[in-house]
Image (cartoon, rainbow, N blue to C red):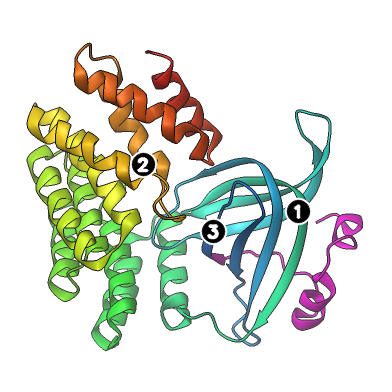
Amino acid sequence: MDRSVLSELSGADAVTHWFGSWPSFHDAEVISVFLARAGQSVLRVYPFHPQKPATVDFILENVTDVELVDFSCQNVINSLEVATATDQSGERIYRLTLAPCYGLAGRIDAKSLRVELRPGKSPDDASHRVLTLASQAMCEGRFDEADRELNTALLTCSDKDESDLLLQQLVHLYSHPQNKNLAKAQMYMDRRETDQPSAHVALSQSYFQLYTQANFSAAQHWAEVAIQRAEMEKEWSVLFSANAVCGLAAKQAGDRTAIISALDAIEPLIGKHEEISYGDVVPFLEAMGESGDETGHKARYLAGLIAPLIVDQQFRNRAETVARLM
């Protein structure tokens, strides 16, 4: 990292003092990403320093551009770089670049940046070591080793949330293009449902059926389960995404009634909660946008409503393209 940039960052001294030097963030885990159209956005990273654990928050003000891909249940990076750059309007910005290992990668540009140190173990630290080792093994093609690490940890894990993280990783392990065994992946996905039935797990099931198994009727079923649970749990972000998956699966299955129901359910959720991922509905609206009937009109109308709310530039552009079909 450029030392001149490091010297500009408020809070960088505390990070350097804690770790003895500025960390490379090799094998660090991205715990969470919160993106806001205005005000503060936060990237929370947990460096792999077992002897002196701490979490580092990168607090960004006025994000100007984002290119992030492959966020999943567990996100290990090869490195994190902070640099300065010039945006399209000629203004100086800070650029955080995440080099991929397993999961999230890409960059975030913002007009200002500071860091905060949070000493102590990450809230999900108990599973961090195993997940990191398994991710490294998967990156290097050592799939049997990843399986051993994850299943050994499952045998001794008593925390339901940590067990669910391990099961999610096993689903990813057996959905990997070089290690594909969809029967095993389905087995671990079903175990998640047995151990901890929730709106989030049902939504994961629907995504798995839609994008991995290409089983549209099963995807629609699990999306409907997620909708029912999300309404009871008041999980508005899950409710929004589940309706989007339900509509897309219904489009593939030719279920017009379910398509209309999904479109009608999406509109009142817009703006209901700040954590809603508006980009999730874009593939559904794209699939419906060219239709000449009422479903196409509604899809184009919704695309116009959500486009300004989407942080990711690529998905925002796609939504705007659908809206312009009117």
Judged from the image, the secondary structure of the residue bearing numbered disc 1 is strand
What residue lies at 80% left-to-right and 75% top-to-bottom?
Answer: 16
Return the residue at label 1.
82
Judged from the image, the secondary structure of the residue bearing numbered disc 3 is strand
Q: Quadrant of residue 253?
A: top left
From the top left corner, tell me how far across and down residue 184 is, in percent.
16, 59
Return the residue at label 2.
280
Residue 255, visible in the rendered structure: no
Q: Which mark is residue 33?
A: 3
Q: Are marks 3 and 2 in contact (CB under 8 Å)?
A: no
Category of crowding for the residue at label 2, using alpha-carbon neighbours closer than 10 angstroms: few (below 14), some (14–19), many (at least 20): some
Q: Quadrant of the N terminus?
A: bottom right
User: Relative to 193, is 322 above or below?
Assistant: above
Magenta span covers which residues?
1-30
User: Relative to 199, is 177 above or below?
Assistant: above
User: Earlier along the polypeptide chain: callout 3 or callout 2?
Assistant: 3
What residue lies at 15% left-to-right and 37% top-to-bottom?
Answer: 261
Q: Amino acid at mark 3?
A: Val
Judged from the image, the secondary structure of the residue bearing numbered disc 2 is helix
User: Relative to 254, is 306 above or below?
Assistant: below
